[in-house]
Image (cartoon, rainbow, N blue to C red):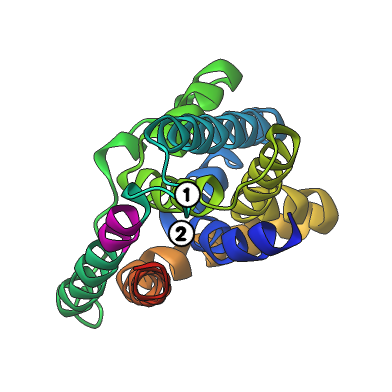
Amino acid sequence: MRSATGDVLPFAVVVAASPINIIAAILLLFTRKPVANASGYLVGFAVGVTVVLSAATLLAEAIDISPDSGRSRAAYALLLVTGMALVAAAVRTFRGRPAAGEEAAMPKWMDGIGEFGTTKSCVLGLTVGALNPKNVVVGLATAVIIASGELSAGQEIGVVAVYAAIASLGVAVPIVAMLVLGERADDVLDDWKSWLARNNAVMMSLIYLLFGAILIGKGIGGI
């Protein structure tokens, strides 16, 4: 289990470091019920990533991609191809980054987030955690690693739980910052939001590149 947990940690960090996930949490901290709304988003997000990884792992096991099966090499070949596609996406995203002084565009689903209540915030977190294409791709790749590890059901649950906890850290950090910083939190969080929005393309390029390199290595090693 330790080996499998170590293998999935980089994948969880990729999700945790995604700027858009964090920006949404920060925006909710400027609503009328900041901590309740952001906490609802955090819970929904954690559930979302857990559901995606659990479902993908069950699917991978149903297909049987254990090392002894003929499908194992095909699964790792898919990781290799996905890694190469992510490296290409890293180059494309970096080249499409906003010019100096240009305001970065935010996703449409962030419109009106300032009026959300706790229930809508939780649903938003669930949607982002489960349906964000980046999170889905990472979840599918992680599922291949878990399903090929020949773990018991209890061990798989433990690995999924660790993945979900690490993946949710990026969303949790702004909430902790508000609770710790008190009156200074608004200025700090606003600075974080501006920095993340301004550097979103560059950060995503690095994330794509890192994750792509990891998948290429895993794919080559498993074929």
Mark 2: amino acid? Ser
What segment is highlighted magenta in the picture? 73-79
**Mark 2 in CB contact with mark 1 (< 8 angstroms):** yes
| Whole-percent x, y for residue 159 in the image | 68, 47
The residue most toward the bottom is 100
| Res. 30 mark | none
Q: Is residue 76 magenta?
A: yes
Q: Is residue 124 left or right of residue 209?
A: right
Which x, y percent locates residue 1? 73, 54
Q: Which secondary structure type mostly characterizes the magenta part of the structure? A: helix
Q: Amino acid at mark 1?
A: Asn
- The reply, left or right, for residue 150 in relation to residue 66 is right
Q: Quadrant of residue 219?
A: bottom left
- Outermost residue toward the top in this view: 119
Q: Against 106, is 223 above or below?
A: below
Give the image location of residue 56, x and y in percent. Answer: 43, 36
Q: Is residue 146 above or below residue 214?
A: above
* Residue 109 vs residue 86, the one in the foreground: 86
Q: Which residue is mark 1?
A: 21
**Which residue is labeled 2 in the image?**
18
Q: State whether residue 102 appears in this view.
A: no
Tell me if I can see residue 55 in this picture.
yes
Which of the 4 image quadrants contains residue 186? bottom right
